[in-house]
Image (cartoon, rainbow, N blue to C red):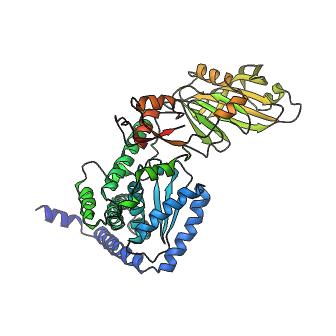
Amino acid sequence: MPGNRFSNSLKGPDSRIIRSMWVAVVLLLAGTVSSAWSMSEKKEIEIGQEEHQKIIAQYGVYKNKELSDYVNRVGQRIAEQSSRPELEYTFTVLNDEMINAFALPGGFVYVTRGILTHMNSESELAAVLGHEIAHVTEKHGIRSTNRAKLLEGVNQVAQVLSGVPGLYQMGQIVNHTALMGYKREFELDADRIGAEYMARAGYSPDAMLKTIEVLKNADRIEIAQARLENRQPRVYHGFLSSHPDNDTRYREAIEQAMALRVDYDEFIRQDEFLDRLNGITYGDVQRAGIMRKNRYYHPKLGVKMSFPADWRVDALPVGIQAASQTSDAMLSLTTTPIKRGVVIDDFVADMGFRIREGRSITIGGMPAYIGIAERAQTPYGVRPMRFAVVADTRRRVAYLLAGAGQYDLTKIASDREFISTIFSFERMAKQDYEEARRPQVQIVRAEPGTTMEALAAESPITNYALDKLRVINGLYPKGQPTPGQLIKVID
């Protein structure tokens, strides 16, 4: 009998260890819920306050009082209908482009600039806030942390007691699977409960269905783009994994909340919500300088340059780095101070490169040097590197541009692109300062003949403008605005 063979395989000291470990897992997991609910509200708030300071320090608060007050007003209206209305809830708009919303224990709820730009009505904002308030009321953060810590402890004990690597690996798998399962469990729990809260506050729960679909579409295009660009996707909440398509359990939970809806339609005006978004900053504010299409401006230093089409530009700790679409070539721009009266050739000699070829020239009206370093350290390891040094003697700063390819051996495959970018480097003219504005969301009314393709062509969005515009307007993958419809454009 299969059962007998299984029983026989669990005899001896190893079987006692395995049984003991599984008993420990069951007991520890059973205790996580009770330990979370037994935590005092005072302690919960203390944890939230401590972590709140870290969140603010890391991301910063988006400084727009009218928008912040509006988000707080919607959030407080929903929180009053929650199972813990006595908590003092704090709603914060973070100055970050990532598409995310989250909550800390004790009533601290956050939405990012990035997720707000993907909302198209107050009801959709209410769906996001209701979901996060539910995470607070159900103490999901504390329960997840307890489970993670306890499972980690179980894994460590298993390794020590058993001395069996396979058992320890099994513990790691259980840990990972449990955490992923709990994530989906808690997300669906927050959807169901959050839908009830927003319904009692007068919002239609079906807005949660619309919101999740928009966020799933944002994940879809990010994953597709990351695959094309040979990089990891930047998805933060895992909307596709926690809310897969045709998820009957999720949809039924939301629809059941419809019976609780209270008629507060005067609170739900789409135009008012979109007006609140008018002028909100779009894109990365952590990067030094401003990207519009493929043109990079640094108003503080008064310089600009152009990158090849389809390249993406990311922030470095002390500069920027541009990567080809498939990530097989990169070019960085960094700065370093120079002394008064420095000779460019002497400056390059002090850099320690073994230069295959190089010469002094002028780039953008400034003394410069361009060459190839025979073997230099690059993001891909030791490679031949195209480099240039441009000296701004007025500001006493040197600009260092360095490009390399992933598969380069002696030749530099993307050298033509590197040279073109290097020679585009120059000082900004007066009109450039007018152009060098951080992109913003503008709310406009679609006219007859308005197409998303035309709006994307005029947009300063660097890459995938059409897909991104369609997602933020709820028109992905192929939708078009109707005449008279309020839509978001980036200007």
Q: Nearer the viewer, residue 276 or 119?
A: 276
Closer to us: 33 or 259? 259
Decide if residue 304 is in sight here.
Answer: yes
Q: Nearer the viewer, residue 94 or 411?
A: 94
Expressed as whole percent of the image width and height from the top left, the position of residue 36 reads 41, 75
| Picture quadrant where residue 28 is located | bottom left
Residue found at x 52% / y 43%: 441
Please say if 438 is above or below 70. Answer: above
Q: Quadrant of the C terminus?
A: top right
Residue placed farthest to the right in the image?
341
Which residue is depicted at the point 47% across and 47% down?
Answer: 117
In the image, residue 469 lies at what x, y percent? Answer: 44, 38
Q: Name the residue located 82 percent from the left edge and 25 percent from the top edge.
A: 345
Q: Position of residue 73 (x, y in %)?
A: 48, 64
Quarter occupied by the N terminus: bottom left
Image check: 154 left or right of 113? left
Tell me where residue 446 sits by quadrant.
top left
* Residue 490 falls left or right of residue 243: right
Where's residue 71, x and y in %? 49, 60
Residue 157 shows in the view? no
Would residue 390 be found to the left or right of residue 340 on screen? left
413 to 474, vertically: above or below: above
Task: Say above or below: 400 vs 113.
Answer: above
Q: Nearer the viewer, residue 174 or 386?
A: 386
Q: How many marks?
A: 0
Tell me where residue 460 sits by quadrant: top right
Q: Residue furthest left?
A: 1
